[in-house]
Image: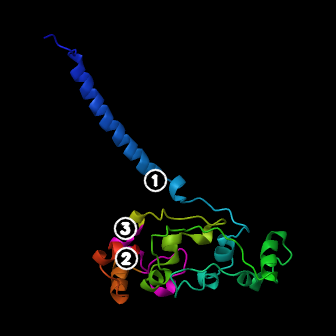
Amino acid sequence: MSQIFHHSSNALARVTIFGGVFILGFIGWAGYQLDASHYATRQEVPRDQPVPFSHAHHVGGEGFDCRYCHTTVEDSSFANIPPVKTCMNCHSQIWKDSPTLEPVRTAFRNNGTIAWVRVHDLPDFVYFNHSIHVAKGVGCETCHGRIDQMPLTRQFATLRMEWCLDCHKNPAPNLRPHEFITKMGYTPAGDQEEIGRRLMAENQIQDARHLTSCSTCHR
């Protein structure tokens, strides 16, 4: 019986198999890169807001403490968005006729709210508690970046699970004394690893096995 396939068919089959594996690997790599890209995570992308608000001016320039506006950050899982009354505490006297702030004045007169666009928006299947992180010594800057230098608020970190796990596996480098929780540009007074280990003991932070358990963030 004569040979059906030419000898070169063996080489073609090997090249095809190798190429298929390479293409599948490339597709997987490209998918991961896209999923981790700023396009997907929205990292470093400023959000358009109904009223332009500059943290650089209010926090960096005027020196507002984060807790003046985000009043529940120490005792609630949610860091509240300030009501328009908080804005009007100052803007009933300062820039009180500015056209830019007319939506704020209108909302205040009508007992309404401003439809702010959330910048740090975790999926519904992720549980995050602000008060726990603050109580344990994680500063605002650790997760939100140098908010005092942002004319337009943007997402500092990826908010991907691997980013959270990096800290949960080893919290010590990200801990600071409670009096510096809201301080921007914090510099530790000494060795950060030593300070972190001390704060882990003082704040009774659990070990990595508990902090990286699925049920810690997914409930």
Instruction: Please give the label number shown on residue 44.
Output: none
Against 46, is 189 above or below? Answer: below
Instruction: Please give the label number shown on residue 216.
Output: 2
Q: Residue at x 37, y 41 (%)?
A: 26
Q: Position of residue 150 (x, y in %)?
A: 63, 67
Tell me if residue 70 can be seen. yes
Q: As rendered, which of 212 and 177 lies closer to the eye? A: 212
Q: Identify the residue position indicated by label 1 in the image.
A: 35
Instruction: Please give the label number shown on residue 166.
Output: 3
Q: Residues within 10 Å of mark 1 (few under 14, many from 20)?
A: few
Instruction: Tell me where the magenta segment starts and ends, as one range.
Output: 164-189
Tell me if residue 171 can be seen. no
Q: Earlier in the sequence, mark 1 or mark 2?
A: 1
Against 24, is 152 above or below? Answer: below
Whole-angstrom CA distance, mark 3 to mark 1, is 18 Å
* Type of amino acid at the residue the image marks with label 1: Asp
Q: Position of residue 187 (x, y in %)?
A: 47, 76
Q: Seen from this angle, which residue lies furthest top?
A: 2
Whole-angstrom CA distance, mark 1 to mark 2, is 24 Å
Viewer-side label of 3, 2:
2
Q: Earlier in the sequence, mark 3 or mark 2?
A: 3
Magenta-drawn stretch contains 219: no
* Type of amino acid at the residue the image marks with label 2: Thr
Q: Residue 218 appears in which quarter of the rendering?
A: bottom left
